[in-house]
Amino acid sequence: MELLKEKILKEGRVLKGNVLKVDSFLNHQMDIPFINELGKEFRRLFPSDKITKILTIESSGIGIACIAAQYFNCPVVFAKKSKSINLDSECYRTNVESFTHKCVYHVFVSKKYLNEDDVVLIIDDFLANGNALLGLMDIVKKSGASLEGIGIVIEKANQPGGSIIRSKNVHLESLAIIESMNEGYIRFKDE
Ligand code: 5GP
């Protein structure tokens, strides 16, 4: 998505450890008209009228998912993170290793908000090693819902997440794919 690539080039900052900071429009301050365009693009890429839920993970996926959900006319469910094991039998649970915080979160979704009748679109901000998505996919599987696809704002192709998820035959769409980046430059795939 050209608009997103331009925004990343203009406002993104590459930090050590293969981290892209996009705090000015996505992860801290949020540029709502811009994110609205991302929402429209997700709708174009996932036109199915069967989608009943958008699933994301707290915290940075929530705002994006909520804006996108207006184009899908469905609720957003976000997986909650907790540092202690949640033994509530009314929840689907899984573990996710955080790329940015270098720790393992226990993640859960209430059974009230996801079940076998649901058709789910997963949305998240970044795809790096794929752990967040694998956790969300595990929750979808445990709920018996079907997975329509996964929409990602920024995929970093120099990390293995994209190939891991694509090898599972999931409809994965990333609005921008970064091939490589360094403190001085960002190169997108297909350039
Ligand atoms: P993964 O589980 O795919 O390794 O990482 C995905 C999660 O880590 C995303 O939900 C995002 O919050 C965070 N993340 C991964 N890479 C980056 C990055 O380069 N920049 C930012 N801001 N967050 C990232």
Image: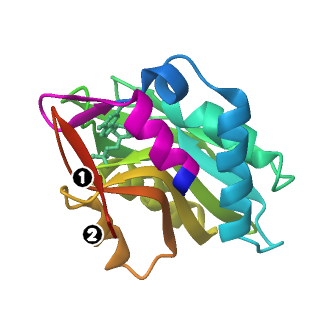
Horizontal and vertical percent for residue 92? 52, 48
Q: Is residue 112 visible?
A: no
Magenta-highlighted residues: 3-20
Local secondary structure at mark 2: helix
The residue at the point 42 percent across, 38 percent down is: 8
Above or below 152: residue 25? above
The residue at the point 46 percent across, 48 percent down is: 5
Amino acid carrying mark 1 in the image: Asn
Q: Quadrant of ligand 1?
A: top left
Return the residue at label 1.
129
| Residue 108 falls left or right of residue 17 | right
Do callouts 2 and 1 mark residues in contact (Cβ within 8 Å)? yes
Q: Quadrant of residue 146?
A: bottom right
Position of the N terminus, as image quadrant, is bottom right
Position of the C terminus, as image quadrant, is bottom left
Number of numbered discs present? 2
